[in-house]
Image (tube, coloured by chain):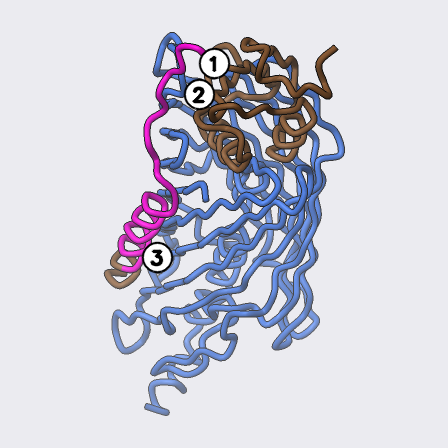
Amino acid sequence: MMKYVKALRHAKFWKLGMSLLIIILGLSLKSFAQITTNNALPIGKGKAIFRVQNKIIRATGDPTEANRELLLQAFPVVGVYGITPRLALFGVLPVLDKSLTLTAPQGRITRSGNFGLGDARLFARYDIFRKSSKGKILSISPFGGAELPTGSDNERDNFGRLPQPLQLGSGSVGPFFGAVLTYQTLQWFFDAATSYQVNTKANNFTFGNEYRLDGVVKYRLFPRELRSGVPGFFYILLESNLIIQDKNEVNGVSDPNSGGTTWFADPGLQYITRKFVFEGVIQLPVVQDLNGNALETDFITTLSVRVNI
Amino acid sequence: MTRSFALTGLLAVLLLMFGLNHQAVAQQQEIKNPDIRVGVDGLACPFCAYGIEKKLKKIDAIDKLYVNLEDGTVDLALKSEMTLSEGKIKKAVKEAGFEVRSIEYVNKAAKPKSQAK
């Protein structure tokens, strides 16, 4: 086994592979729980909403000999509770499953850790402005919170300790803040959210700070004309996610092969009833301007169910 | 990956079952002769409608209610001989995250005497 590890450590493409892996994972994992519609979930006093999601991220097209294939699956559970009509508490607890397949000196290998809890996110949102009229509502709501180190950050596989981005947790606290603007009518829904996350150091590794600009436009396809009562709404939607991430730091040194800008366009569908929401989107990269050499994301799929409690 | 799909599917099913059992998801039934018609601002989707239903159902005096998204109204049928004040309606609507636009006592007897002019 030690022979293998030694061989791996001295393989040039292995080092390159790990650097590139750090970049793509660094971008992807930090965006798991930060979905535009989480920030904008409507909630009243004493009301609760739960949401379960399944997200799959695939990244391939490695130009190096390592021919890496990255597959990540996240399963975030989101809970929202209304403290007052304007103040809501949000919690996001993801379960993660990550694997990286690559060509090493001994052949094609797959590195993966345990299937388990990742870093939780806790935040609060307050509606500082709300204007409503018949069938319409406009609100502006700042939010803030932190990503907490609830995920294991010392996962190992047969080849030794997994690199930091393959760990379930970061081991660090990541405070973040932002604001969301929401405008909804019976026919249309718009929201735009901006946020900034400061990532702190753990295990001699610091993920780059992250700025996000997320937006969504939804249009009610069915029913074409509203009838009496509360019919289910079927929406077609387009989300957009702009993510700008600073370079990571490894042992206090900035990693030139990390950070960059990614912009996703996400077509999707949503069906809303009084009690449930079923939704699905696919995030397709429009722009990926990453520093150095990095794997680019092929797609991210998200399926989600929400329930009103 | 199989275990992730299995867990996701299992939890989604559990959540759906929990949601269905937590509180009856009975379809609304239109009220032919409502006692009170409340105009509510901000009602813009079915998910929002459930929030206001839940709040209003906690008021003892209310027997049945019917949300109409198109008109942005909630019709209330009160229990026999019961009355309901504007204050209680406004409080429930506000706590649900909405604003009262109007309150019309279709059945004048539903208005508390202390409120009657």
Q: Distance between the residues labelled 3 and 1?
A: 56 Å
Q: Pointer 2: residues within 10 angstroms few (<14), some, or many (20+)?
A: many
What is the count of numbered marks? Answer: 3
The residue that mark 1 highlights is: B34
- Mark nearest the camera among 3 and 1 is 1
Chain under label 1?
B
> Residue at position x 54%, y 17% from top?
A185
Work out whether mark 2 precedes mark 1 in sequence or the reverse, and give the earlier one.
Answer: 1
Q: Pointer 1: residues within 10 angstroms few (<14), some, or many (20+)?
A: some
| Left or right: B6 as drawn, with respect to B95 | left
Q: Are marks 2 and 3 on the same chain?
A: no
Nearer-the-camera pick, A217 or B8: B8
User: Which chain is represented by brown in the image?
Assistant: B
Asked if the residues shown at circle 2 and circle 1 are in contact, with their CB atoms under 8 angstroms apart, the answer is yes
| Residue A208: image location, x then y, percent | 64, 58
Circle number at residue B66:
2
- Mark nearest the camera among 2 and 1 is 1
Q: Identity of the amino acid at label 1?
A: Pro
Chain under label 3?
A
Q: Identity of the amino acid at label 2?
A: Tyr
Q: Do labels 3 and 1 share a chain?
A: no
Asked if the residues shown at circle 3 and circle 1 are in contact, with their CB atoms under 8 angstroms apart, the answer is no
Chain under label 2?
B
| Residue A130: image location, x then y, percent | 71, 26
The residue segment tinted magenta is: B7-34
Q: Identity of the amino acid at label 3?
A: Leu
The residue that mark 3 highlights is: A71
> Residue at position x 57%, y 38% from top?
A43
Q: Is residue B109 above or below residue B87?
A: above
Q: Distance between the residues labelled 2 and 3?
A: 47 Å
Nearer-the-camera pick, B81 or B60: B81
